[in-house]
Amino acid sequence: MVALICDNKFDFSVLRKQYNEAEIYNSLSDCLADKRNFTAVFISFFSLKQCEDIIRGLRRSDRYYATPVFSDHPDLRKELIDGNFDNHDMNNKSIDNINRNFSSLKDYRASSWKRKMLAYLYCRRDIEIHPETAPDNRLYYNYPLLKLFDNEDDNQEYVFTELSGKNILSENRLIDRIFTCPHCFSARLCFSERCPSCNSVNIKTVDFLHCFTCGMVGPEDDFVTEDKLICPKCRAKLNHFGEDYDKTLESGVCFECGEYHTESKPLAFCIDCKKHSLPENLTKHSIYTYNLTDLGRDQILNGTASSMLHMRDKDNYVHLPYFYDILDWFLEMQRVHHDEYMFSILGVKVDWDSYEIISSIAKKLRSIFEPTAIATKNLTGYFWFLLPGTDKKQLKAIEKNVLTFFDELECPTAADTAVKLFPYTAAKGSQRQVKAKTLIAEIATEK
Ligand SMILES: [Zn+2]
Ligand SMILES: [Zn+2]
Ligand SMILES: [Zn+2]
């Protein structure tokens, strides 16, 4: 049985014939109030906004986040619906496919908007997630599919970057590579030309003349007296180009400081954080279309099975629950066997909440640790390293390496980045029973 949500103008006799049984509602809330589960939802409203609101409501609901949805509104983005009303055979095929895929997810817990979205993708095999330009967005792009499921996440722009880092999505096609502000990563930049000496915008490009008699170089206007060219310094008459004078490379003059220049200085102004940056200091951000990977499909099918927890991301960081599991094992082994399971932990807190900064630091930071170290990170700027066979003295040396690493970090914002270290070495012969999670919390609050 299918549901039809429509305004009163819709003639539903055809639809009722095509789908045997159809229940009609005037609003989404009426449809959601019906406790029956519909195999598909058809939406027909005069206004685009009404259609979009209903689709959004379905995707955020607990029952219809992955259900096939069709609409006959001509202006609706095609990737947000599973088809229009025209092709009944194809629609029936889609309904079967999507619902068959969905029924294979019977143990799946759609506990968050992200998990609802992943289930939605899982049910639609060949879907490609497209970005669209969005001047209101800090990155100038957003993903309509993402906005369908969520509108509140702070780091929404980076949800797909995160998922592709975990190999759940793959970057499919490069759509754009944009410049962003190195301080706040906004793409809303305003460029202007400045005087290289005093930074003023009050500059102009003019022709410059060079007097052969005295060597004077200046804007052409200064040489023109009535309709003759006369050097303002030595009063020589400049009659013949190439013999008395020529033109020079300098072409800009600043009305603020009076200096001449060959090239003006371009400067980017960030509309969001109001800071100026030189073009060479701007950061870059790539915009892709995305696809669900086979691995991602596998993980959605198996829920949060161990395969997902054991996975390392592309920079060789493990998921936090897995990190806790290993640390629990180390703590237990150390308690039972004492010194044989000597280990240290190093926490690194980077006081910067930008996803871009943290992910660029993550890769480089991981490479200064031994491959045997077990590393984990979270988006709030905490990195944890579990270092098997490392004593207090060796840990000190590692701490020094980490601090040197941050001192030498080539990053325009490095100066603003505060770094804190949380070292810990398991005490010899300790009989204390403590859970990994508690221990990490203790270490992080010790200073
Ligand atoms: Zn002269
Ligand atoms: Zn100037
Ligand atoms: Zn900025």
Image (spheres, rainbow, N blue to C red):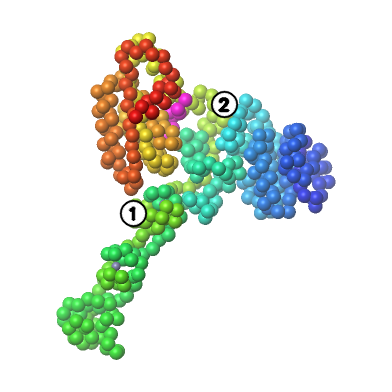
Instruction: Give the residue drawn at x 28%, y 20%.
Output: 391
Instruction: Give the residue drawn at x 49%, y 42%.
Output: 155
Which quarter of the figure is the N terminus placed in? top right
In this rendering, position of residue 254 left or right of residue 300:
left
Mark number displayed over residue 171: none
Residue 94 is situated, as x and y percent measured from the top left of the image, at: 68, 39
Residue 70 is situated, as x and y percent measured from the top left of the image, at: 70, 44
In this rendering, position of residue 115 left or right of residue 86:
left
The answer to the question of whether label 1 and label 2 lie on touching residues, with beta carbons closer than 8 A, is no
**Residue nearer the viewer, 407 or 24:** 407
**Residue 50 seen in the current view:** yes
- Residue 437 is drawn in which quadrant? top left
Residue 306 is situated, as x and y percent measured from the top left of the image, at: 51, 23
Instruction: Give the residue drawn at x 50%, y 25%.
Output: 307
**Residue 94 seen in the current view:** no
Which circle, 1 or 2, is nearer the viewer?
Answer: 1
Which residues are drawn in magenta?
Answer: 312-321
| Mark nearer the N terminus (1 vs 2) | 1
What distance separates the C-alpha of mark 1 from that of mark 2?
Answer: 46 Å
**Residue nearer the viewer, 64 or 396:** 396
Label 2 residue SS: loop
Residue 443 is situated, as x and y percent measured from the top left of the image, at: 37, 25
Mark number displayed over residue 280: 1
Question: Could you tell me the amino acid type at mark 2?
Answer: Asn
Instruction: Give the residue drawn at x 64%, y 48%.
Output: 78
Question: Could you tell me the amino acid type at mark 1?
Answer: Glu
Identify the residue position indicated by label 2 in the image: 302
Q: Give the crowd class for mark 1: few <14, some 14-19, many >=20 residues within 10 Å.
A: few
